[in-house]
Every structure is written in C-alpha cells, then in structure tokens.
Image (cartoon, helix red, strand yellow):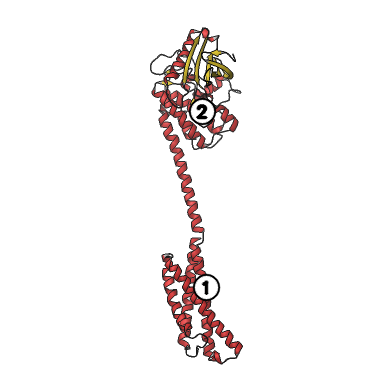
Amino acid sequence: MINTIIGKYKLIRLIGEGGMASVYEAEHELLGTKVAIKVLNPILSANAQIRERFINEAKLMASLDHPNITKVIDFDDQAQQLSIVMEYLSGEDLNDKIKRNGPLSENEITDIFTQTLSAFQYAHEKGIVHRDIKPSNIFVLQNGFVKILDFGIAKLFGQGNEMTQTGTQMGTPIYMSPEQVKGDKSIDHRSDIYSLGVTLFFAINGKPPYNSNTESQFEVFTKIVHEALPDFTVSSKFNDLVLKACQKNREERFQSCDELIQKLTSQNVNASNERTNKEHTIVNVKEKSKPSRKNTVYLLLKVIDCLASVLFLLLCIVSLTDGRWDTYDGSNRFITETAAIGTFILLGGSLLIEFIFLLRKITKKLSWLLITSIGSLLIWNTMMIESPGHIDFREVSIAWFSVGLLLLCICIVQIRILIKMKKQLN
C-alpha cells in the first residue's frame, strides 16, 4: 500500500502490522506534515462486529484529551477500507527499548510509569478500561515523553455495552489479569492495574514473568489464575508495588492508578532522602576527619614557645653557674647573645601570630589558651627586651628560673590539649 493516498495523506512506509491492522507513516500532500495511519485489514472490514469495534476505537481515542494518550486527527471510511489518522510519534515502544537496553533504571521506571499511570487514571475516570496494556502499547518518545497506544479492545465498564460475550478472552495472554483469563463479564479498571503490574515486572527484570515461547497458553493462563508471580531476577525498591498490583483478588490490589502513582513516587522520594542522608553523613565524616588547619598552625606555635622556653631556661642555668656572659671571650659571647636575640624573635613572632588568630576569632575552645599564651609571652618579652646581650643573669636568680619553668609547663599542657583536640577531630 506504499504510495497509496488515504484522504489527504500519502503512505510513505510501513511502521508495523498486526492481525487486525497495519500502521503506516504518511505525509500530508499539501502541508508535508507527518502522521501515522492505522489501516484495518481489508478482509476484516467486511466483518460488521470488527468494523464497529474499529470505529469505536477511533471515537474513543478522539474523545480522550490527555498529553500521554495518542491523539486522533482524522478518520477515513472508504469501501473495504477503514483508517484512523493519528499523530506521528518518533521513538520506540517500551518493549523494544527494554530489549535493546535491558531493564530500566529506577529513575526511568519512575518517570515512564508516572506518565503511564497518569494517562490510565484519566481514561479510567472516563469509564474506559484499556484491556490490552503491555510494553508494546507504551511508546517512549525521543525526549522521554510517554504516549499510550491502541485502545482497540478498550471498553466502557459498568455500562454493559462491550462487544464480547462472557467467556471471550481479550488481550495479550502474558499481561492479562486473572479475571480476563476467566472471561469475567464484570471486568473493571483494576484489570488494567494488574496488567500495569506485570508490565512493571518486565521493566524491572528485563523479561516478562512468563515465556510464551516455551510455555503453552494453557500453562500461562493456569499460572496467572492460580500461582504467584515468579521470583524477581533483579532487586528493586518497586518489587513490593508489583506484588500488590498483581494480587489475584482485585480487592487486594491498588484501587486506582493514582494510588499506585503515590506509592511509586513516595518510594523515589524515600530513596532520594536516604541518598541525601548518606551523602550528608559522608560529608560530616570527611569534615570531622579533616584536620583543622588553624589547630595545626597553633600547635606549631606552641612547639616554638616550648623551644623558646627551654632556651630561656638554659640561659638562666648558664647565668647561675658562670655569671655574666659579657665577660666571656668573643666566641662564647656571640653564641649567648645570638641565643638571647633568637629567643626574643621566636617569642615575639609567636605573640604576633597568636594575636592575629585572636582577632580572627579562632574557636572558643582555644581562647583561654591564647590568653594564657599572651600573658606568658608578655613576661618573657619584658625580660628579654631590656638590653638583650647585656643582661646580668646572676640577677635573674632562682625566681626567674622558676618562672621560666612554669611557662614551659604551661606550653606543654597547651600542646597536650591541642593534640587531644586533633585526635577528637580525627
């Protein structure tokens, strides 16, 4: 039928075909816009019941106005040929997508099935049951948008106007609900929820629960009616949702697509919160384990204070044992004066840096350490600043030696506290 003209459209290529109809890509002769045209098999057009069902599908889809349901643009009725003109979709159905890429990720499942369930909630509110939900009837556009296809065997529930009689099975065997298998005349929207659950099983595992290639239709139907779904091959947070949606008793399933959407999205939010909490914990651990740069520098300054205190004590000991150093020969005097000036520079520099830290409001735990450090350094510098190099250390006596020893002890205590704080951070 390629190049055939149907209404204002020219058929370009065959997209797909089934037992009842074929779908073609077509182009408007004047505008050049693309559409998809579903053409009923000419042989079946003579069957009054099938013809009426096809017309009803067109009317049904034309009555539905939802972004996730394929739109019907036009209908063409010619002798021995009925055609439904629909919007053209560029992408792939869910069946092909999963066969090509494998099971869907949890994010993909949430995105695709939230849109799918939204479309069926809308249809169910209109009193419409699809009755043939399966992956190949869920079309995913290139931008991730979902479109529902094929309302060919859909019916209005609760009105008794379906064209099938009790005992007639309508749908794709693997995805049929127990009530569909049994040919129940009171099928309602919860049959669609069962089929959506099986479709979700396929999305999670990458394969359907039953294999129509190795199992007979009778075996599949027996399992659908009497046996629980087989075990999942992939662990997912959505497994429990599938089990509830596929309960044999429809009263125990989700009672609406909205209810299933809420559970689906809440699972995603909970997982997101868990990830956020884990990430927050990791960040806190990293922050705690990362040594404080300020504490490290401050610890170094305390070590310098200790060295200066030791040097000061040594000078005190020299003065108490040998007297004035300016009576020594040149080399001894140079060494002792250099030691005194070095002590003064170390203590003065340490005081300046600690004062800067204080201005920057270093942690409160270190404030008292800074205060004691400044006090001790002021005592040291008062001693050293008075004519360094000409100090009579005999005047320092035991009292000054005791002061130096006390200051050294203070520095050692401060170092121990700082080391303890660093270990706590680690």
Q: Which mark is residue 394?
A: none
Q: Secondary structure at mark 2?
A: helix
Residue at the spot of label 2 = 199
| Relative vertical location of residue 269 with respect to residue 351 in this rendering, above or below | above
- Residue under the image location 59 percent in, 15 percent down: 3
Observer able to see residue 209:
no
> So how many labels did they put on this image?
2
Residue 85 drawn at (x, y percent) = 50, 17
Residue type indicated by callout 2: Thr
| Relative vertical location of residue 96 with respect to residue 407 in this rendering, above or below | above
Residue at the spot of label 1 = 303
- Residue under the image location 51 percent in, 67 percent down: 297
| Relative vertical location of residue 118 with respect to residue 351 in this rendering, above or below | above
Q: Secondary structure at mark 1?
A: helix
Question: Which of these two is toward me, 150 or 378?
Answer: 378
Question: Which of these two is toward me, 91 or 95?
Answer: 91
